[in-house]
Image (spheres, grey):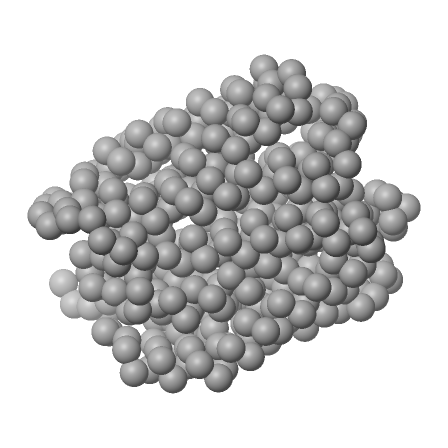
Amino acid sequence: MSASKERLWTSDFIKLNISNFMNFFAFYLLMPLLPIYLNETFGAGKHETGVVLSGYTLMALLVRPIAGYVVDSFDRKKVLVLVYAFFFLMFGGYIVAGSIVAFAIVRTVHGIPFGAVTVANSTAAIDSLNSSRRAEGIGYYGLSNNLAMATAPTIALYLHNLTDSFMVLFGSALAIAGVGLMFCSSIHPRERAPMSDRHISTDRFFLMEAWREAIVMACLSFSFGIISTYIAIYSVQHLEGRGDSGMFFLLASVGLMLSRLVGGRSLGRGRALENAQWGMILSLFGYTLFAASDSIFAFYASGLIVGLGNGHMFPAMQTMFINLAENNRRGTATATQLTAWDTGIGLGIVVGGIVSELIGYRTAFSVGAIVNAVGVVYFWIVCRGHYRAKRLR
């Protein structure tokens, strides 16, 4: 079959997109309302909330390098099903956690399977793609994340307003994760011999060739960590209900999906570097607009702009990580990128909580925009030349 006729949307690729959607839908269903839940249920302050919620990201961060090694070394489907089942079961812990300490433990432990699932599912999806459509497929794969981000926060707010029950949200997330487990369990991946050399070394857990790109990813996600975690409580406490955080996420996801549809074709033509750099500039403008103005126009416009930027940037950066790795180290490359992203998210949550407690949310958002700008400058000065020199495909 000619490269031009190779299928993109195979059965396994579709199933893995659905399981990825369910994974992130369950995640985003809880994320924007957890600060409110902790405050209303346990009386947690801003700093406590930041510490409790950052545990999830911290554990995902720590487990992803290990997950990359395991995915490259063992049967990828078995690994995926095992960690997805763990991810599904952990949602039950939120229902029974009766104290802030118990909730913090459950939330922190839950980060382990979440981090592993994202690595295993992404790697399986990349494996399912034909080589001539891989870059294009990576761009489209992210649409499942974006669709979840577009719908889950809005549905979460609707369910909470309708039922006034966080238990309904926790139960819904449990059921949705169960559907995702069913889909990833039904894939039929191509035969692949696990990596025979399983020695332990640093480069088996982290793609050392991509440490510069990892720094950029951490800087770019720092801003998103602050906004995505604190926007709901910020809009309630400081915008007096004028800003709807659900609509913000919806607009951001519309931007993400639009740019992914356009960027997918561009990635297919080998323009990862160009997609990444223009996406970063757009995102930086969106974060700066959000931090600089408290008008409703800026509130919503920044969501759309950040979405447009991240929709170009993220799959382009993922393609760059994959292109810097040998084929048998795709799991490590994916884990390295996601680890870097989680590092920035986690730092953003913690720093955002501290700064907002001491000075205010507006300053916290400004700090996020500044760190984002540092990442963009570093990419232009250092990473572009490095990628051109070291890319393998």
Front position in the image: 361 or 143? 361
Please tell me how many numbered marks the rendered image carries: 0
Q: Is residue 222 visible?
A: yes
Identify the image quadrant of residue 138.
bottom left
Q: Left or right of 204: which side holds 44?
A: right
From the viewer's perspective, is residue 179 above or below residue 229? above
Q: Residue at x 53, y 20 (%)?
A: 93
Q: Is residue 347 left or right of residue 24?
A: right
Is 287 on the left or on the right of 309, as rendered? right
Q: Is residue 278 left or right of residue 286?
A: left
Is 172 in front, or is 287? 287
Residue 339 place in picture, x, y as percent: 43, 53
Residue placed at 31% from the left, 29% from the top? Answer: 82
Q: Where is residue 383 in the image (x, y as percent from the top left)?
A: 42, 78
| Position of residue 36 measured from the top left corner of the image (x, y, whole percent) | 75, 34
Name the quadrant of the C terminus.
bottom left
Residue at position x 23%, y 57% from top?
329
Q: In which quarter of the image is residue 370?
A: bottom right
Q: Is residue 189 positioned above or below 254 on the image?
A: above
- Quadrant containing the N terminus is bottom left
Measured as percent of width and height from the top left, residue 260 is found at 49, 63
Q: Nearer the viewer, residue 265 or 329?
A: 329
Rendered image quadrant of residue 172: top right
Question: Does the rendering let one see residue 253?
Answer: no
